[in-house]
Amino acid sequence: MLNKSRILPLLATFALQGCLSVGPDFKTPDVGAPASYLPQGEIAPSEARYAAGLPSGAWWTAFRSSALNSSIEKALTNSPTIAEAEARLRSVAASYRAVRGENLPNVDMTGSRGRERINFASFGFPEAPPLEVDRYSVGGTIRYDLDIFGGGRRNDEAAQANLNAESNRAAAARLSLAGNVVLQALEIASLQSQIKAAQEVIAADNETLSLAEKAVKLGSQPDVSTLVPGAQLAQDEAALPPLKRRLSEARNAFAALLGEAPGKAVIPNFTLADFQAPTDVPLVLPSELVRRRPDIVAAEQSLNASVALIGVREADLYPKIALTGNITNLSDAFRDTFNYAASGWRYGADLSAPIFHGGALRARVGVAKADAEAAAARYNQTVLRAFVEVADAMSALTYDTETLTAQRRALAVAQSNFDARKRLFELGRGEILDTLDALRQANIARRATAAADGERLKSLAKLYAATATIDTGTGSKKPTT
């Protein structure tokens, strides 16, 4: 049978060796990542390919736009969103250092100077007059919690996990900002092309109306001949202001992403010609996305912190032992304050154990367990959302490619029709109104093609952004503090 006098030394040995930590140990949840992002039966876009061990980096450079690259660099430097994320990261890093410091021996110094009145009557000497003396004291204390049941170690684990989570949130904020800049730049470029095509349609409408008016004046056509081209012109002109409004809003949103007010920002005049569509989009495997996408890693580390806090709360249910020592020098003359003869000291081990707290300690364990379950649900939701984002981007790219191909065919047919009508008119065998209408149809097809081209480029950007990752190990590597 174990001798009771040896229990405390044994527990101290466990603490020093780090063998005893109450609470569950964290394990990365197995989400059962699928082999493919898309449901069975759906075909992945031809541009996408799986590639294991992809390096992290500036994926937006694949669009080969120097104006885009410089804009993203500016946004990452000036954005208030990034500044806030980095400030939060510094705050959490400081909190982590504070937690680590609490697990080390605490040493404090004390000192005082005062004057004291001693009333001898209170000690049974009524005849003795009161005495006033100076008091000088200086001393120090040291305390070290042996952390027998690992509450301090679990708290350190939680703080480390919170720091890793915040580091990944900051990385996710940077990737999100870069993705938004790319999408907004492509929106500006697409609207520029659509506005140009709409203006060409309006110019063709004006020519048609002008010719119709001349025909009416010459008497070769009735007055009603101008109604149809006039109505068509009004309709096409009405379509232009909404495009310009969207372009203005896109520019203002782009300025905000750069961290500047719209009236101050210098925004590149993006066009679709400024971007080169990547023909090869390397994607991480779903199982690797779970380990490397920063928002997923952040959710995993938040879950780790929540699990560790269960151990912190469970350790509160058990006794605590701390090694303490203090020394105090007390004298009525300053010159004698640092003499050993004026000193008093104490050292030993302090034991505290909870007896009755009205169920509060057990309740806090229950709170920590419920918080961990909620963190696990958030982790699963984050993973699920990531898979959906990738699947949506892949499907959008497939269908946008089909749409762009169809629009290009429609444009080719409309352009061929216009070329044929133009040749007939030049040969004197065609009508100018038919020629101008064919030109208008070609311009309409050109606008639709520009819109489809912009949407496909945005789908490519969304696919890159949805699978953007960080270096393996970021979630578990201890940052420099």
Image (cartoon, rainbow, N blue to C red):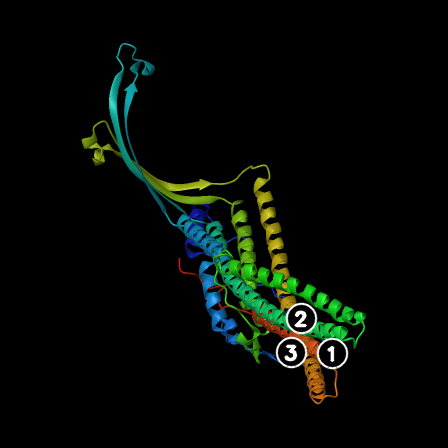
Residue at image position (75%, 82%) is 431
Q: Which residue is mark 3?
A: 45
Pointer 1 with pointer 3, Cβ within 8 A: no
Q: Which residue type carries mark 3?
A: Pro
Q: Which residue type carries mark 2?
A: Ile
Q: Nearer the viewer, mark 1 or mark 3?
A: 1
Q: Which residue is mark 1?
A: 433
| Residue 342: image location, x then y, percent | 23, 32
Counting residues from the start of the chain, the first of labels 3 and 2 encountered is 3
Q: Nearer the viewer, mark 3 or mark 2?
A: 2
Pointer 3 with pointer 2, Cβ within 8 A: no
Q: Which residue is mark 2?
A: 202
Mark 1 → mark 2, Cα distance in angstroms = 14 Å
Residue at image position (52%, 65%) is 178
Indicate the secondary structure of the residue bearing disc 3.
Answer: loop
Mark 1 → mark 3, Cα distance in angstroms = 42 Å
| Residue 49: image location, x then y, percent | 59, 79
Indicate the secondary structure of the residue bearing disc 2.
Answer: helix
Residue at image position (63%, 81%) is 46
Q: Nearer the viewer, mark 1 or mark 2?
A: 1
